[in-house]
Image (cartoon, rainbow, N blue to C red):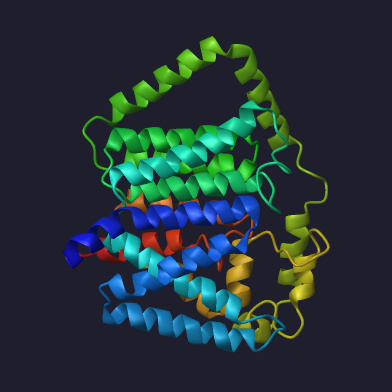
Amino acid sequence: MIQRLLKIISLFSSSLYILLLFAFALSGNKYFLIAASVICIVYVFLIRWRFEYFVFIVFFSVSILITSSFWNYLFYQPLYFFFISCVVGIFIYQNPPSKFWCGLVFILVASYFSFHILSFSDLNEDVFFGNSRNFISIWMIVVSIFCYASPLSRNVKIIIFSVSFIISSVTLGRSGIISTLFILLSYIFLSESKSKTKEFLFIISVMLVFLVSFFDEIYFLIETIVQRFEGARAVDPRALVLDCYIDNIDLFRFSFGVNAFDGEYCGTLAIGEYAPHNSLISLYANLGVMSIIYLIIALIMRAPLELKCIFFGLLLRASTDSVLFFTYFDFIYIYLLLKIYHAKRY
């Protein structure tokens, strides 16, 4: 009876966890984050722990503590997000979400964004609490990879990645467009399937039908996207932040993080407060030289090329905003890391 109850819980609880995070992102109400943390505590007792999981968590937790001691930061925040992300990522890997519940999560998230897009809402002001429209694409990537973890059919997953790309394109975020398209194409052409050509032709056919049906609207959208790519600002705040960190790197900051010894002022150059707009900078700030290990673990292990490209697509999106390392999105990174790690055994 207890084992059956635990099985039922495992089928929907990860979906509930993501919905609680989504509710927190929309409202800013910390009670949703607390509720998600309670689910994480339950997961600690449901996970089938392995020795290498303990080594991974302890090693990088100690690295975070050491690096944090060299700059003025609340060390418990990255530790908190790192730990819960490891727990949730392990749980999702060991207990893939059911078709129904992950599909429900995707439909709810995609429908919410679609409603605001079709209502011509201000995507910078009306969608999230304290976050810009750029977070729409990262949320679409997160929920689509969550569905990728499920037993949904290949065709359904292609539809999910396609919708993720379409919604991200409409929001006009350049990084979101490139990364979601990269993930979509990687899944279609690099995953194992005997009907890749048919699938690609089907997508092209559907796109042509939409193009003919909504030509004026799509033409305007494409024209706007092109203008976004061509209209890069003369002074890119992200480039200012990156150039500052590169100019100020030395042996100590290379070893103990780019923010060591009061170097965090570089991260304020974009908007006047600390926001490096690059998750890789956030990673190096929190882990120092150990961040290299944290990144290349997945890249040096043998795994299907499709899986590695999806992993790279996530990193590509994270490279232009502070959305990973260490935030509540990190469980997706941990999940992909585990999938790559265990894939080498096959």
Residue 59: horizontal and vertical position, in percent?
43, 84
Q: Is residue 217 left or right of residue 205?
A: right
Residue 243: horizontal and vertical position, in percent?
75, 64
Residue 339 visible in the picture = no
Vertical relation: 312 (above or below) 85? above
Residue 176 visible in the picture = yes
**Residue at (70%, 33%) from the top-left corner?**
121
Residue at the farthest front position: 1
The one nearer the camera, 92 or 175, is 92
Q: Is residue 15 left or right of residue 76?
A: left
Q: Is residue 194 left or right of residue 270?
A: left
Residue 75: horizontal and vertical position, in percent?
61, 82
The one nearer the camera, 257 or 24, is 24
Which of the image's four quarters has the C terminus? bottom left
Residue 7: horizontal and vertical position, in percent?
23, 59
Snapshot quadrant of residue 2? bottom left
The one nearer the camera, 83 or 207, is 83
Q: Is residue 267 left or right of residue 161?
A: right
